[in-house]
């Protein structure tokens, strides 16, 4: 007969009764909802129902998306804890409390910091952002702010210089997203120097103005292509070619299929359909006798149909290769009072400037911002909340 030492007996007993803890990381797959994702992670129907029931009050299940992350902690096959994560700021947790489960949304602390960002273009604005250690979405934000003066597919040159003051929304020091661009300067070989400042008008509306109080905005945008990071089978880099062809009566932009096309001005859709040689076409009638047309689209923007009201910068479709083409491109045409005009030659007036009576107030607000824009050493400002 073997006699086990008491210490060994205790150790064996402890091993036998030690709960088995498993941690599973899963994602919501295509054609799955949260419940099916939980079942496929091994939860039985009863537990799944309890978890879903607990979440009902704090989570809107219609917002469940493919790719949402699940982290399950199972103890002896029973769910102990679930983290359900959609984004760094949208996270829910479910924990076991006896026989039931309790769910809550996790409070994530975010803070907004104003940062000065400086970019030097070598190949593209997108790459310049990456080189500077920024998220490339900063390029989109900047293109949006300068959209009335700069065509970011066409006007950007090697050596162009950009600097801006931009809000960064952070969580534990990590960038979640950019907030507003407070001020920005673009110095370019082709476009010269443009400086814009965000300022709130007395009616509460925020807008962008140049340093002298003139508006950064115009009735028409510089480009019919919204600057975007486009991945397509043609590769991610753009080789923009634009050509005004008189016989053709429009401008051709070589653009990867799927590049977002936005309306250059407010207006009403007059055509949204296939026009044969023009392929999928959208035409928009604007004020003062102007009309713009966008041809060879791969698809239409949401809610774009004949008669619909369109706002400047609204996506009317995505560039493509439909109709009679020799390659993917956007054909952009502009008419004034029924006759074709060259959109590249049009000079559109700026929107209303800062009212003269408010110029002093405007300068007072903008001067320190301009100083921060020009001086790298000025410290960043951090404030809580978003
Ligand atoms: Zn064309």
Image (cartoon, helix red, strand yellow):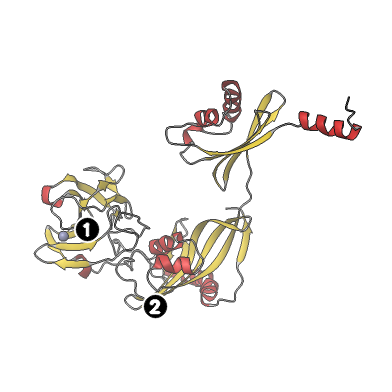
Pointer 1 residue Cβ closer than 8 Å to ligand 1:
yes
Q: Which of 105 and 282 is in front in this view?
A: 105
Residue at (35%, 63%) from the top-left corner? Answer: 147
Secondary element at tag 2: loop
Residue 183: x and y, percent?
Answer: 48, 68
Residue at (29%, 68%) from the top-left corner? Answer: 154
Q: Residues within 10 Å of mark 2 (few under 14, many from 20)?
A: some
| Above or below 250: residue 213 | below
Work out which residue is located at the far left of the displayed protein and give it: 247
In this orientation, does residue 87 appear? yes
Residue at (90%, 28%) from the top-left corner? Answer: 3
Q: How far apart are marks 1 and 2 (CA)?
A: 27 Å
* Circles 1 and 2: CB atoms closer than 8 Å: no
| Above or below 386: residue 208 | below
**Badge 1 is on which residue?**
329
**Badge 2 is on which residue?**
159
Would residue 298 appear left or right of 192 to someone viewing this image?
Answer: left
Q: Quadrant of the N terminus?
A: top right
Residue at (29%, 59%) from the top-left corner? Answer: 225
């Amino acid at each position: 007969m073997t006699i086990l030492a008491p210490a060994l007996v205790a150790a064996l007993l402890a091993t036998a009764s030690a709960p088995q803890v498993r941690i599973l990381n899963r994602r919501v797959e295509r054609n799955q909802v949260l419940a099916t994702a939980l079942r496929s992670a091994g939860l039985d129907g009863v537990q799944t129902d309890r978890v879903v029931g607990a979440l009902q009050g704090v989570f809107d299940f219609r917002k469940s998306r493919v790719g949402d992350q699940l982290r399950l902690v199972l103890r002896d096959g029973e769910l102990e804890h679930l983290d359900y994560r959609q984004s760094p700021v949208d996270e829910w947790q479910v924990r076991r409390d006896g026989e039931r489960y309790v769910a809550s949304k996790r409070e994530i602390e975010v803070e907004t910091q104003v940062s000065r960002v400086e970019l030097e273009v070598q190949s593209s604005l997108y790459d310049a952002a990456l080189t500077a250690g920024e998220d490339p979405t900063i390029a989109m934000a900047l293109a949006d702010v300068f959209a009335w003066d700069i065509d970011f597919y066409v006007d950007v040159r090697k050596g162009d210089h950009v600097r801006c003051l931009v809000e960064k929304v952070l969580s534990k020091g990590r960038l979640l997203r950019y907030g507003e661009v407070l001020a920005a300067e673009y110095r370019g070989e082709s476009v010269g120097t443009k400086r814009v400042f965000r300022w709130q008008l007395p009616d509460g509306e925020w807008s962008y103005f140049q340093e002298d109080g003139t508006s950064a905005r115009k009735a028409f945008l510089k480009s019919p292509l919204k600057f975007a990071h486009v991945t397509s089978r043609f590769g991610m880099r753009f080789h923009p070619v634009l050509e005004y062809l008189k016989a053709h009566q429009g401008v051709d932009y070589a653009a990867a299929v799927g590049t977002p096309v936005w309306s250059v001005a407010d207006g009403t859709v007059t055509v949204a359909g296939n026009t044969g040689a023009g392929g999928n076409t959208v035409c928009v009638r604007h004020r003062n006798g102007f009309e713009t047309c966008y041809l060879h689209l791969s698809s239409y923007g949401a809610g774009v149909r004949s008669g619909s009201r369109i706002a400047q910068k609204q996506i009317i479709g995505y560039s493509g290769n439909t109709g009679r083409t020799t390659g993917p491109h956007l054909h952009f045409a502009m008419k004034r009072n029924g006759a074709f005009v060259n959109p590249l030659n049009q000079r559109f007036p700026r929107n209303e400037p800062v009212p003269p009576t408010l110029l002093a107030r405007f300068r007072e607000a903008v001067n320190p911002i301009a100083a921060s824009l020009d001086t790298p050493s000025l410290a960043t400002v951090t404030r809580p909340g978003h």
